[in-house]
Amino acid sequence: THVDPPKPDDVFYATGLQPQVASEYAKLGVSSLERGEVGLLVLNGGMGTRLGGIVKGLIELTPGRTLLDVKLRDPVARRFGVTIFLVNSFNTNEATSKHIEEHHNSNAATRVVPFTQSLSLRLEPSGDLFRGLDGSPQTYCPGHGDCLTQFVVGGLLQQFIDEGGRHLVVSNVDNIAARLDPTILGLHIAKGAVVSAEVVEASQGDVGGGPAWVGGRLWTVEHFRLPATSRKLPYLATNTLLLDVRQWDRSAEFPHHYVEKNVDGRTAVQMESLIGEVTRSEEHTSELQSH
């Protein structure tokens, strides 16, 4: 398949807007917030493999202040009473629930709605079950694309829509710079995009997914899916998305990809889906450059 980098006008620079233009976008965003159309989806799942199994969201930035605390205390979300949908995994759910109960249930200005990813079984490269040192089958979370799938099949998407929701702002728990911004929200609304994806300029040595034209469509493609000659894309996706759930085709499936992990010094095979590929199924996707 032929792959091309994004064209100059495919990426909209959200910084450096003229004050009057930014003000108009902000008004659109605030109006949507006042109507209760906005929700936050915070990705707090996964296995924490690179961190030795630590629950990433509970890492402290300063004594007594975790990554999760920053996300749950988003000032715009608190001001407008925005619901925060918190995706946990079987590895993060218990510790996260305890932390919220101890630190966020009282005097909370926002409603936190937790739900969990599904789980799957690791395999040997041969296709046999991958077993731990104690002989038991090893489980894992099948990628952050699974979060949107569970949001749909668990009924939360329909509940969100029934309560007046329309725009879902998605970000990783460890991306504390991804805050709810009325101006960016208004820009997303003004462009009429089903999906808006934040991207940053790629630096030398960066590895990750980014926008590319594939088969006549612009979507976020992970680097391992690209031909070797096309892997140096000019932008990287940050996994921060704005999604118009009333226009989104919720029946679209996320493909699963073969991934090898080092577990206890052995190679385990996992099949994972990627949330950035929500851009693949939509004709109207905006790429927003924020830095």
Image (spheres, rainbow, N blue to C red):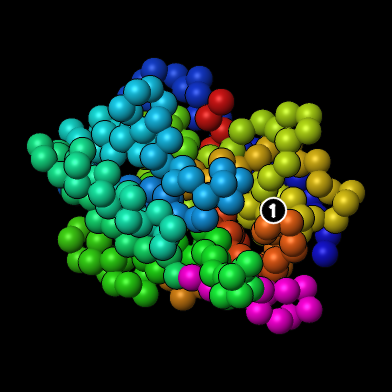
Determine whether the residue tagged by mark 1 lies in a helix, strand or loop: loop
Q: Residue at x 67, y 48 (%)?
A: 209
Is 73 placed left or right of 283 in the picture? left
Residue identified by numbered label 1: 222
Residue 114 image point, x, y percent: 29, 57
Picture quadrant of residue 93: bottom left
Q: Residues within 10 Å of mark 1 (few under 14, many from 20)?
A: some
Percent of width and height locating residue 190: 39, 42
Compared to residue 84, the image places residue 178 above or below, namely above
Q: Quadrant of the C terminus?
A: top right
Residue 162 occupies quadrant: bottom left
Q: Is residue 148 magenta?
A: no
Q: Which residue is outermost to the bottom?
A: 128
Q: Is residue 135 above or below residue 6?
A: below
Query: Which image quarter holds the N terminus?
Result: bottom right
Q: Spot the residue most to the right.
A: 229
Q: Is 104 left or right of 180, judged from the image as shown?
A: left
Which residue is found at the position 57% from the left and 33% from the top?
289
Residue 43 point in image, percent of width and height: 43, 50
Res 253 seen here: no
- Residue found at x 40% / y 30%: 60
Most prominent secondary structure in the magenta stretch? loop
From this viewpoint, is residue 268 visible? yes
Of 269 and 175, the residue lying toward us = 269
Total label count? 1
Residue 129 in the magenta stretch? The answer is yes
The range drawn in magenta is 119-130
Q: Between 168 and 14, which is closer to the camera in this rendering?
A: 168
What amino acid is found at the position of numbered circle 1 in the picture? Glu
Which of these two is toward me, 254 or 166?
254
Q: Position of residue 49 (x, y in %)?
A: 58, 51
Q: Is residue 265 above or below residue 9?
A: below
